[in-house]
Image: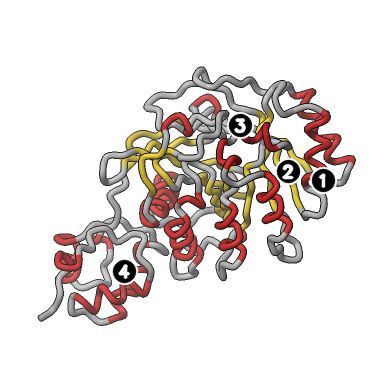
Amino acid sequence: MTATLESQAMTTLLGKTEEELIELAKQVGEAAFRGKQLYQWMYKRRALDFTQMTDLSKSLREKLSEAATITETKIERVFYSTDGTRRYLLRLGDGREAEAVFMPEERRDTICISCQVGCAVGCKFCMTAQLGVKRNMTAGEIISQVVIVLNEVYGEGAETPHGTNLVFMGMGESFLNYQEVMKSIRVMADENGLGISPKRVTVSTSGIVPRIYDFANEPVRPHLAISLSATAEEQRNELMPINRKYTLANLMKACREYPLDERERLTFEYVMLDGVNDSADDARRLVRLLNGIRAKVNLIPHNPAPELPYRASTLDRILAFQKILVDKEVPAFIRRPRGQDISAACGQLAARHQAQS
């Protein structure tokens, strides 16, 4: 007897690999190539409706539409910034909410995506931490952010005018949802999938040390960014409680042992907090911490919120900090805030239903 989709409980298809969809096709009595067609429709053509898949038989489309959905992720609301940034408040299938951010530039677009509903890490300077963690997102929910954003910006399945960069810097800690994050990356990197090169993808972690070693050995490996934001153990314990489990010393050891390609650098994200971690001594300690690592540093002016106890460092202080790094031949860049007026900037994502500048 031919299996049915219902009996296999395969109700949501986005996030499944080509091999999984080929097996699905076989289970419902179809040829294997139907699974490949379904895969290309969902990813390469970003189709979210079975009726669009015109080279699938009508009977198969009806069978699919009766028993499965491509994604349950829906746009709840889009917020538009004066700088062109868009913040997407997304409703997942169980009613939980997550966020993605679209940032256009002249030569590329960047989509900042979430991997958890909320976050368990508890960084004291981040609004997402105020939510706590509700649950991990599935690979399909992670991928749905990219598909939905590109479709909303350019039209369903339309060619994008230039490259798309992805950063796992939205809600959640990527390495606390490691398997689903990596599965989503493999599907998105596939030429028959979304076709987004791993060289255009950056995964950020607050420092889950065992997963850094796992990540180093992945056959499909994007760039790695370390959220650092402190230069001493006690300081990082206070700002980023995850440091009590994975110490700064162990984190930096993992970074020194991390294998880099010939032109690759490890990125270190450093949120600049006025009077807390932005002194000349902090800058000099950072130089020493990064000694022996092919690194670059992104200096991120803190994006304040009424619920957070910190202020942003002044531009003069950030520039002085940057100069100390650059003078010691550590590449350092000041990240320009994007989407502050719609609560879309770094550290501001908290599933708000309105913008708070």
The answer to whether marks 3 and 4 mark residues whose Cβ atoms lie closer than 8 Å is: no
Residue 281: x and y in percent read: 82, 30
Mark 2: amino acid: Val
- Percent coordinates x, y for residue 50 in the rendering: 24, 61
Other-residue count near label 4 (Cα within 10 Å), few / some / many at <14 / 14–19 / ≥20: many
What distance separates the C-alpha of mark 1 from that of mark 2? 7 Å
Label 4's element? Answer: helix
Residue tagged 1:
330
Q: Is residue 192 above or below residue 157?
A: below
Q: Nearer the viewer, mark 4 or mark 1?
A: 1
Q: Quadrant of the N terminus?
A: bottom left
Marks 1 and 4: in contact by CB < 8 Å? no
User: Whole-Å distance between the Cαs marked 1 and 3?
Assistant: 23 Å
- Please tell me which of labels 4 and 2 falls first in the chain: 4
The residue indicated by pointer 4 is: 38
- Residue 335 seen from this side: no
Q: In the image, what residue occupies the spot 63% across and 49% down?
A: 225
Q: Nearer the viewer, residue 310 or 240?
A: 240
| Circle number at residue 297 | 2
Instruction: Give the spatial CA distance, label 4 vs label 1.
Output: 47 Å
Which dot, 3 or 2, sits closer to the camera? 3
Residue beneath the point at 19% across and 67% down: 8
**Tag in front: 4 or 2:** 2
For the residues carrying marks 1 and 3, which lies nearer the camera in this image? 3
Q: Judge from the rendering whether residue 145 lies leftward or rightward of residue 317; answer left or right.
A: left
Location of residue 94 by image quarter = top left
Q: Which mark is residue 239?
A: 3
**For marks 1 and 3 on the same chain, the one whose residue lies earlier in the sequence:** 3
Picture layout, residue 115 above or below residue 58: above
